[in-house]
Image: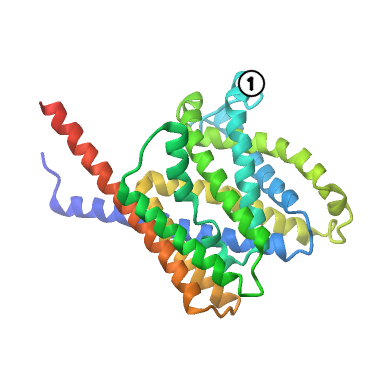
Amino acid sequence: MYEPLETNKGNLLTKYLRILAVVAAYWVVSILTVFVNKALLSGLDLDAPLFVTWFQVLTSSSICFVMSALSRRYPRVFNVPTGNPLDRDVLRKVLPLSLLFTAMIATNNLCLKYVGVAFYYVGRSLTTVFNVVLTYLLLGQKTSGKAVLCCMLIVIGFWIGVDQESLTESFSLIGTIFGVLGSLSLSLYSIYTKRTLQFVNQEVWLLSYYNNVYSAVIFIPLMLINGEFRVVMDYEHLAEPWFWGVMTVGGLCGFAIGFVTALQIKVTSPLTHNISGTAKACAQTVLATTWFSEVKSFLWWTSNLVVLIGSALYTRVKQLEMDQRHRQQINSQKV
């Protein structure tokens, strides 16, 4: 029997409304997280960026631990995969990825500490370029000429952006370097995530749990080497409730962005997620320049536009290539 037309329309409308709600949640949480992290890293007069990042990782680890415990006790209410991060086999297989995860979030926050929110997207725009290069060097997978041209467009936009930002008082060379390192570590993390997921039964949530737990430990010697323990202990507002309140907000945002990112990919697709992220970055840049009353040159805005166009075209090229491979597989099966 066929369902009534009205029922089909109702189900389709519900599906679209759900997708819209998830995408909107991703935009709000993602933009809010960037602004909150910027305030924590640059507005607290606390020169301890690794400590701020460590607290966010610790918060995410605690939430994951509680949810995992509740899932074991109330499996009908909390349906999340359970695992033991202290298992030797798990530690041996996941720890290399956790090192990349630590490098990724550390360089990400260090970039945001030194550069403005408006320049943040361009400063970390080379992720796609590194993906293409590292995929070839590490996996031997070649990229089409069209995709390479899109990457060249992104590099041109990045170069123009850095050149124009260097003319402003807000330019930070060290922040830009951390942005490039953040793009590199994110690319490496994405590549090795595919290899590591097989060890956790393809459970993204469980892998995130392990990464946060191991990263919370890895950050301790890094903070010690960077001399941040003394900086934190000497911080005049360390005992203030508002300080731990804003730190907790930052930690919750760090957990939330991982959740809504996975949720957006789940209800849409990785391709749609990339498109949504590109559009969000554009809105974030405009919002940041308005919020901080920043006046940018025509070439500065051009660099953002070039990076956005290059990223969007790359996504479109990869989509067409995936569709073509899918049709070829179907045709080969028919033969």
Where residue 175 appears, x then y in whole percent?
Answer: 65, 59
Where residue 197 appears, x then y in whole percent?
Answer: 48, 30
Figure quadrant of the C terminus: top left
Left or right of 153, for residue 208: right
The extreme top residue here reads: 89
Relative to residue 135, is residue 260 depicted above or below?
A: below
Figure quadrant of the N terminus: top left
Protein image colouring:
rainbow
Left or right of 227, for residue 331: left
Relative to residue 141, is residue 152 depicted above or below?
A: below
Pick whichever, 332 or 241, lies toward us: 332
Where residue 168 appears, x then y in whole percent?
Answer: 62, 75
Residue at the spot x=66%, y=38% of the render?
A: 215
Residue at the spot x=18%, y=35% of the render?
A: 328
Q: How many marks?
A: 1
Pick whichever, 11 or 148, lies toward us: 148
Pick whichever, 30 or 123, lies toward us: 123
Residue at the spot x=67%, y=55% of the render?
A: 110
Crowding at label 1, few (<14), some or many (≥20) Cα neighbours within 10 Å?
A: few
Quarter residue 59 falls in:
top right
Residue 310 visible in image: yes
Where residue 229 appears, x then y in whole percent?
Answer: 84, 47
The amino acid type, in three-letter code, at marker 1 is Asp
Residue at the spot x=70%, y=39% of the render?
A: 216
Pick whichever, 107 or 142, lies toward us: 142
* Circle 1 residue: 87
Quarter residue 72 falls in:
top right
Q: Secondary structure at mark 1?
A: loop
Residue 64 visible in image: no
Relative to residue 24, is residue 228 depicted above or below?
A: above
